[in-house]
Amino acid sequence: MGAIIILILGWWIAGKSQRAASTALGRVPNMDDTLRPFLTSLVRYAVIAITIVAVLSQFGVETTSIIAVLVAASLAIGLALQGTLQNIAAGVMLLLLRPFKAGDFIEGGGVAATVQNGGLFVCTMRTGAGLCITVPNSQLWNTAITDYSESPTRRIDILVRIGYDDDMDQGLTRLRELMENDYRSLKEPAP
């Protein structure tokens, strides 16, 4: 009878814990919609696992051996899914720290493209040629990310060659005139 009560209470507490975690995470600013269900499910299943161990304890089962088996199984699964877990950890960090957002043009992980969607495992991006690229989060997290969309003002360096016999001052004056008369050139900062 005690095991049934523990099971019912545990199941009820698991549901309440999941809703409480969802409410608490909903109050966190910039919480990603992809990350919230994952974390709330993690809370629920942790409570259910504790409940099952408590129920088995009521039946006289040695819980230390069950916990040891769970730890060993978790270690084996963790080693088998090492790459996947690395992508999840990187995805969580990218979702929490937000070095970029959907719609930004970034360069990172050997790819330069516009971010379509950032998920828990991968980031979907679209290149200028219209190709869809799926980049593992660990690849993005382990490299420097350049976000070209962060600032609307950018400097463009243009290489201009001039002959040895040409007048350097006259060439610079002509280039300044061209830049000042171009509508795309900003007045501040000056070209």
Image (tube, grey):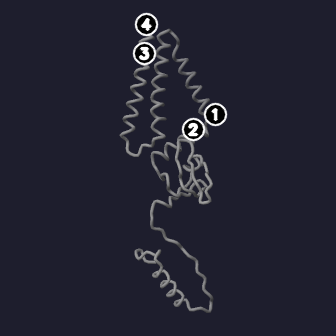
Quadrant for the N terminus, please: top left
In the image, 151 versus 3, the foreground residue is 151
* Residue, disc 1: 80
Q: CA distance from mark 3 to mark 1?
A: 34 Å
Residue 14, horizontal then vertical, whole percent:
43, 24
Q: What label does residue 85 carry, if any?
A: 2
Residue under the point 52% across and 72% down: 156
Q: Secondary structure at mark 2?
A: helix
For the residues marked 3 and 4, what is the alpha-carbon distance in whole angstroms? 11 Å
Q: Amino acid at mark 1?
A: Ala
Q: From the viewer's perspective, tell me whether residue 24 is left or right of residue 155.
A: left
Q: Amino acid at mark 2?
A: Leu
Picture layout, residue 186 above or below residue 164: above
Q: Residues within 10 Å of mark 2 (few under 14, many from 20)?
A: some
Image mark for residue 8 = 3
Amino acid at dot 3:
Ile
Residue that carries the numbered disc 4 in the rendered image? 1
> Which secondary structure, mark 3?
helix
Q: Quadrant of residue 12?
A: top left
N-term mark: 3 or 1: 3
